[in-house]
Image (cartoon, grey):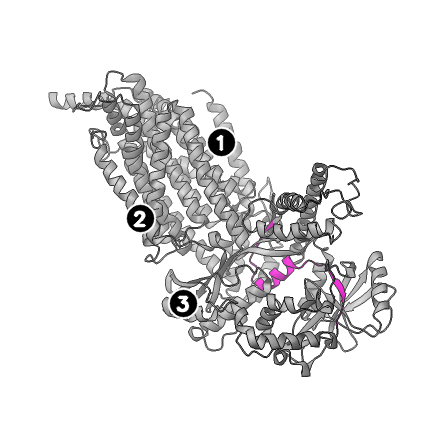
C-alpha cells in the first residue's frame, strides 16, 4: 500500500503528542482523587492534603509532572461540566464616542447619539457604524453640513491625528482604530481583574466587531461579586452635591402631581412622595433616606417623563444617585443624593486614581486611601477649594460611596473613601482600581451561572451516556462485521484518544454539547466503516479474492466518505462561525472528530487491515447472522414515490398549521430575559408556582410581566423564565428579580433559608442551581445569526452537491429533503412543547440540532447520490427509474446500519445524558429518523423527477435489479 510508512509515522507522532497533552490531566485528577479519598467531605483537611500531595513529582523519564504545572495544562471543562459563570460584557460605545468628542454639546451630535441608541436595539452592526450612518442622516436633515473633523465633533485635543481638513472617511478610520484600541484596553483590564480574583483556568476572549468580551470563570460561586468586579468601570468621579433646600421645592411640586396622577406611571394613586423621602431622618448630605422596600417606587417616580418634565432650571441636569449600601446604624434605609450635573454630565474630577490601598480610620473602620495622578490632583485642588464647608460626592458607576463636607482645600491629590466596607469589599475595590479603569462603562448583557452540584451531575450524566453509547457502538459493529469490526473498534478507540488529545493541545473547552459532538463523531466513524465494509461485501459477493475485495471496497467507498465528511464539516464550520459558547464547543469537537475519523477509519484502518491480509491471513467482513442481511432486498422505491409525496405533504402541511396556530416556545436566547433552574426539597406544582410569581412581577404600567414555570427533569426542579426588567441589564435589576423570586418561592423553601443561601444552592439544600440572562440586543444577534446559519448551511450544501455531482437536479433534491426535515422538526416542537417534560425551546441548542440533522441527512443523501452517479456511468442499459431503485436498494445495508447505530447512540444520550441535553437529543432523534426517510423518498425521488424525460417511463413496471443481486438470485434458482 502506498504511503503506509507515512501514515504509520503520522499516527505514532500524533499519538505521542496526544499522550503528552493528556498526561497532565491524568496526573492532576490522580492527585485530587487521592486528596478526596483521605479528606472525604472536609474542605480544610482536603486543602491540607492537597498542599502535601502537590509537592510530589512524577518522573516518567521523558517528562516530569508537577501538580501546579499539570493543573495549568489539564483539559478545560466547560461550565456545564464544572460549574461557574459565563458572562458576556458589553463596553458602552456611547461613552467611548462621548470621550472622543470631548463630551460635545453640539445638538446634532447629541441627537445622533440618542437615535443610535434606538437603532442599536434592532441592529447587528456595531454601534460606531450605526452612529456614522445616523450622524449623516441628522446632518442632512438639519442642513448643517457639519464635518466629522469639526472641533465640536472629533476634531479636538483627544484626537490629535485629525486635522481641520481631514475627510469624513479619514476621520471614520481613525475613530474605528481608537474604538478598537479602547476595546483592547478593556479586555486587558478585565483579564487583570479576573487574575486578581484567583480564578482557576479563566477564559477571556474578545468578540470581534461587537464591543463585547466573553468571560468564563469555572468554579466561582459568588455571582454578585463577579458582576461587580467585571462591570465596575473603576472610573472614580467627584461631584458637587446639591443640598436639600435646593431640591425640596421640586419634590413638593412633584408630590402634588404624583398624588393626582401616580397611576399613569404605574404608582398607586395618592402616593405621598414626601413621606417616601423621610426628610425628617436625613443624613450624610443626602436629599432622602428611603426604605429599601420603597427604592423601586422612588426610581420609577424620578425617572418618569412626568418628573423630568417638571424639573426647574436648577434641577435640569441633576443626577439622583443612591448610596453604596445602608449605613451600619440604619440597615433598613438607603440614602438618596442629588448630584449637581451639567449638559454633558462630565464630572469635575474624572478617573484620576494613581494608586489605592486598604486602610483603617481613627475609629477602626475599613477605608480605602487613594493617591490621584498629577492632572487629577490639580482638578481635586480646584474642586475642594471651591467647595470648602460644602459636601463633595465620591461616585463609582453612578453609586455614591461617600459625600463628606470639605474642611479645606486639598492640594496633594490624596483622599479617602469610607463606605461602610467589609474587608472583602474594600479589597475588591482596591483590586478594581489597581487593575486600571475601563475606557467606558460595561454591562453584563448575557450571563450563564451553573452551580457546582449541577456541574457534577452533568459530568456524571455525560460520562454515563458516553460510556453506554460507546459500548453499544463497539458491540454492534463487532456483531455485524466480525473480524473487520474488531479493526473498526481499534480505529475508533485510537480516534477517541486523538480527539481528546487534540482538543487539549488546541486549548479547546470540553462541554456537555461537546461530549455529544464526540459521540456523534463516533457514529460517523461507524458510518465510515459501514460504507467500506458494505462495499467490500459487494465485491466478495461478486466473486473477488478477499485481498482484491478489500482494495476495491476502500477504493469505491472513498468518494462517498469524502462527500459525507465534507458536508458534515461544512455544517460544523457554519455552527462555529455563527454559534456562541457551548455551540462553538460542539462545532470544534465535531470538526476534530470528523477529521480524526477519516484518518483512523480510512487511512490507519487500511494500513492495519492490509498488514494482516498481506500475510495471507483471512479477515471476515460478516458474521453468520448478518452475512445475507439486505443482500437480496430490492424495493421499487421510485414506483412508490407518489405515496411518499402524499405522506410528506400531509406531514409538512400539518407542521405548518401547527406552527401557525401553536407557535413556538422561544428561549431567552431569542427573546431576551432571564431564567432560573430552582431545586426544592420536595416536588412542587409548577402551575401554582407560576400563578404566584406572576403577581409579583408587575411592570411600570401596572401590567404583569411574562413568567413561566415548568418542571425541569425531576418533580422537585423548576425552570422559571421571565422577561421582567428585560431592558435593564444592571446588577441592581438582577438582584431585584432574585429577591422577588425568593419572596415568591418562600413557602416552598426550607423555613430558615436566607436569600444568600437561596442564590447559592448545592447538593445539600434547595435554591438556584443555575441561571441565565440574555439582553435584548444579544438576543437579536443570536436570532439573526441562527437564521443566517441555517441559510448558509443550505446554500453551502446546494453549491457543494452541484460542484460534486454536476447536476442541479441533485442539488435541488438534496435541499428539498433538508427543508422537509427542518419543517417537520419545527412542527414537532410546535406541537409538543407544551406537553413534554423536558426543554423544547427554540434556542441556540435547537439551531445546532437542526444544523446537525441537516449535516447527517445530507450525508445519508450523498451516499445514495454517489451510487446513482456510479450506476449512471456503469449501467446505461437500465431505465432511469430502475437505476435509481438499484442504487437505493444496494445501499440499504449502509442506510440501516448507520441510522440504527446513530439512533441507538442518541437514545442512550437522551435517556442517560441529563436534563440539559434532552431537548437537543430529541430534535436529533426526530431529525435522524426523517433524514433517513427523506434521503430515499424525497431527495432521490425529486432528483429522479427532475432528471427523467417526461412520459418516457410512466408505464414501465420492472425497472431493474443490481447486477450482484441478480446473479445471486439466479444461482439460488439453479440450486
Q: CA distance from mark 2 to mark 1?
A: 53 Å
Residue annotated with mark 1: 11
**Other residues around mark 2 within 10 Å, as few (<14) / some (14–19) / many (≥20):** some
Q: Residue at x 76, y 65 (%)?
A: 239
Mark 2 or mark 1: which comes first in sequence? 1
Label 2 sits on a secondary structure element that is helix
Most extreme residue toward the bottom is: 280
Instruction: Please state the horizontal and vertical placement of residue 172, each as a whole percent of the image.
Output: 69, 40
- The disc label shown at residue 690, or none: 3
Mark 2 or mark 3: which comes first in sequence? 2
Visible in this render: residue 562? no
Residue 960 located left or right of residue 92: left
- The disc label shown at residue 657, or none: 2
Asked if marks 2 and 1 touch (Cβ < 8 Å), the reply is no
> Residue 895 or 755: which is nearer the viewer?
755
Vertically, is 705 above or below 873? below
Q: Residue at x 72, y 76 (%)?
A: 244
| Image quadrant in which the N terminus is located | top left
Mark 3 or mark 1: which comes first in sequence? 1
Count of picture labels: 3
Label 3 sits on a secondary structure element that is helix
Asked if marks 2 and 3 touch (Cβ < 8 Å), the reply is no
Residue 149 located left or right of residue 799: right
**Span shown in magenta:** 213-242
Amino acid at each position: 500500500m502506498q504511503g503506509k510508512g507515512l501514515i504509520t509515522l503520522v499516527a505514532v507522532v500524533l499519538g505521542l503528542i496526544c499522550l503528552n497533552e493528556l498526561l497532565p490531566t491524568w496526573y492532576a485528577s490522580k492527585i485530587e482523587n487521592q486528596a478526596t479519598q483521605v479528606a472525604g467531605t472536609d474542605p480544610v483537611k482536603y486543602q491540607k492534603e492537597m498542599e502535601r500531595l502537590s509537592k510530589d513529582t512524577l518522573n516518567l523519564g521523558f517528562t516530569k509532572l508537577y501538580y501546579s504545572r499539570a493543573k495549568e495544562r489539564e483539559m478545560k471543562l466547560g461550565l456545564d461540566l464544572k460549574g461557574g459563570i459565563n458572562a458576556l460584557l458589553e463596553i458602552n460605545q456611547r461613552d467611548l464616542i462621548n470621550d472622543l468628542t470631548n463630551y460635545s454639546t453640539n445638538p446634532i451630535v447629541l441627537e445622533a447619539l440618542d437615535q443610535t441608541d434606538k437603532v442599536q436595539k434592532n441592529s447587528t452592526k456595531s454601534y460606531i457604524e450605526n452612529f456614522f450612518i445616523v450622524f449623516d442622516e441628522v446632518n442632512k436633515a438639519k442642513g448643517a453640513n457639519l464635518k466629522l473633523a469639526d472641533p465640536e465633533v472629533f476634531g479636538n485635543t483627544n484626537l490629535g491625528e485629525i486635522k481641520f481638513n481631514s475627510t469624513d472617511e479619514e476621520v471614520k478610520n481613525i475613530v474605528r482604530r481608537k474604538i478598537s484600541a479602547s476595546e483592547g484596553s478593556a479586555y486587558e483590564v478585565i483579564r487583570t481583574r479576573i487574575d486578581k480574583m484567583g480564578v482557576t483556568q479563566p477564559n477571556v476572549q474578545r468578540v470581534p466587531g461587537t464591543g463585547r468580551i466573553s468571560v468564563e470563570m469555572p468554579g466561582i460561586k459568588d455571582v454578585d461579586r463577579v458582576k461587580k468586579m467585571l462591570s465596575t468601570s473603576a472610573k472614580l468621579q467627584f461631584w458637587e452635591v446639591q443640598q436639600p433646600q435646593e431640591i425640596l421645592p421640586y419634590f413638593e411640586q412633584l408630590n402634588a402631581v404624583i398624588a393626582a396622577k401616580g397611576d399613569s406611571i404605574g404608582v398607586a394613586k395618592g402616593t405621598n412622595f414626601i413621606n417616601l423621602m423621610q426628610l425628617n431622618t436625613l443624613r450624610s448630605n443626602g436629599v432622602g433616606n428611603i426604605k429599601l422596600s420603597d427604592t423601586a417606587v422612588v426610581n420609577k417616580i424620578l425617572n418618569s417623563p412626568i418628573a423630568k418634565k417638571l424639573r426647574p432650571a436648577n434641577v435640569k441636569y441633576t443626577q439622583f444617585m443612591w448610596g453604596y449600601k445602608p449605613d451600619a446604624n440604619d440597615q433598613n434605609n438607603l440614602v438618596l443624593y442629588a448630584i449637581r450635573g451639567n449638559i454633558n454630565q462630565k464630572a469635575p474630577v474624572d478617573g484620576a486614581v494613581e494608586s489605592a490601598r486598604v486602610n483603617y480610620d481613627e475609629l477602626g473602620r475599613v477605608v480605602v486611601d487613594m493617591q490621584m495622578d498629577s492632572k487629577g490632583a490639580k482638578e481635586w485642588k480646584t474642586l475642594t477649594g471651591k467647595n470648602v464647608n460644602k459636601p463633595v460626592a465620591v461616585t463609582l458607576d453612578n453609586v455614591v460611596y461617600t459625600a463628606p463636607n470639605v474642611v479645606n482645600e486639598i492640594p496633594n491629590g490624596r483622599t479617602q473613601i469610607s463606605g461602610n466596607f467589609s474587608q472583602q469589599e474594600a479589597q475588591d475595590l482596591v483590586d478594581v482600581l489597581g487593575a486600571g479603569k475601563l475606557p467606558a462603562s460595561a454591562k453584563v448583557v448575557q450571563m450563564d451561572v451553573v452551580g457546582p452540584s449541577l456541574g457534577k451531575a452533568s459530568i456524571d450524566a455525560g460520562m454515563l451516556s458516553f460510556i453506554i453509547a460507546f459500548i453499544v457502538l463497539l458491540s454492534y459493529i463487532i456483531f455485524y462485521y466480525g473480524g473487520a469490526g474488531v479493526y473498526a473498534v481499534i480505529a475508533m478507540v485510537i480516534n477517541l484518544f486523538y480527539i481528546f488529545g487534540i482538543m487539549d493541545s488546541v486549548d479547546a473547552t470540553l462541554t456537555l454539547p461537546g461530549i455529544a459532538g464526540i459521540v456523534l463523531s463516533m457514529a460517523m466513524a461507524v458510518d465510515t466503516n459501514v460504507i467500506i465494509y458494505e462495499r467490500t461485501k459487494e465485491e466478495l459477493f461478486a466473486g473477488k479474492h478477499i485481498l482484491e475485495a478489500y482494495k476495491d471496497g476502500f477504493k469505491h467507498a472513498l468518494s462517498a466518505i469524502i462527500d459525507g465528511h465534507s458536508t458534515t464539516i461544512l455544517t460544523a464550520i457554519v455552527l462555529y462561525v455563527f454559534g456562541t459558547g457551548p455551540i462553538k464547543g460542539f462545532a470544534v469537537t465535531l470538526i476534530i472528530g470528523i477529521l480524526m475519523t477519516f484518518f483512523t477509519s480510512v487511512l490507519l484502518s487500511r494500513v492495519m487491515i492490509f498488514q494482516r491480509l498481506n500475510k495471507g491471513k483471512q479477515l471476515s467482513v460478516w458474521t453468520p447472522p448478518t452475512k445475507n442481511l439486505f443482500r437480496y432486498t430490492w424495493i421499487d422505491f421510485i414506483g412508490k414515490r407518489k405515496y411518499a409525496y402524499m405522506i410528506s405533504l400531509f406531514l409538512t402541511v400539518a407542521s405548518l398549521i401547527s406552527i401557525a396556530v401553536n407557535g413556538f416556545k422561544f428561549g431567552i436566547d431569542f427573546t431576551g430575559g432571564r431564567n432560573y433552574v430552582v431545586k426544592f426539597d420536595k416536588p412542587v406544582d409548577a402551575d401554582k408556582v407560576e400563578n404566584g410569581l406572576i403577581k409579583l412581577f408587575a411592570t411600570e404600567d401596572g401590567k404583569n410581566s411574562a413568567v413561566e414555570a415548568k418542571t425541569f427533569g425531576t418533580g422537585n426542579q423548576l425552570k422559571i423564565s421571565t422577561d421582567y426588567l428585560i431592558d435593564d441589564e444592571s446588577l441592581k435589576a438582577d438582584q431585584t428579580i432574585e429577591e422577588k423570586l425568593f419572596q415568591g418561592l418562600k413557602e416552598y423553601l426550607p423555613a430558615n433559608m436566607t436569600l444568600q443561601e437561596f442564590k447559592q444552592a448545592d447538593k445539600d439544600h434547595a435554591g438556584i442551581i443555575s441561571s441565565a440572562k440574555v439582553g435584548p440586543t444579544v438576543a437579536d444577534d443570536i436570532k439573526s445569526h441562527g437564521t443566517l446559519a441555517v441559510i448558509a448551511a443550505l446554500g453551502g450544501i446546494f453549491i457543494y452537491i452541484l460542484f460534486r455531482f454536476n447536476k442541479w437536479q441533485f442539488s435541488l433534491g438534496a435541499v428539498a429533503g433538508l427543508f422537509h426535515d427542518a419543517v417537520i422538526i419545527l412542527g414537532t416542537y410546535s406541537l409538543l412543547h407544551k406537553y413534554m417534560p423536558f426543554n423544547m425551546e427554540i434556542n441556540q441548542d435547537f439551531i445546532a440540532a437542526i444544523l446537525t440533522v441537516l449535516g447527517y441527512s445530507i450525508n445519508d443523501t450523498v451516499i445514495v447520490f454517489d451510487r446513482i452517479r456510479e450506476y449512471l456511468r456503469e449501467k446505461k442499459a437500465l431505465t432511469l427509474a430502475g437505476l435509481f431503485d438499484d442504487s437505493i436498494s444496494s445501499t440499504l445495508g449502509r442506510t440501516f446500519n448507520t441510522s440504527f447505530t446513530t439512533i441507538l447512540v442518541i437514545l442512550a444520550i437522551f435517556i442517560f445524558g441529563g436534563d440539559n441535553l434532552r431537548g437537543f437529543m430529541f430534535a436529533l432523534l426526530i431529525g435522524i429518523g426523517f433524514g433517513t426517510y427523506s434521503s430515499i423518498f424525497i431527495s432521490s425521488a425529486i432528483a429522479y423527477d427532475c432528471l427523467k424525460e417526461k412520459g418516457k417511463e410512466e408505464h414501465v413496471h420492472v425497472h431493474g435489479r443490481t447486477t450482484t443481486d441478480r446473479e445471486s438470485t439466479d444461482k439460488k434458482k439453479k440450486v
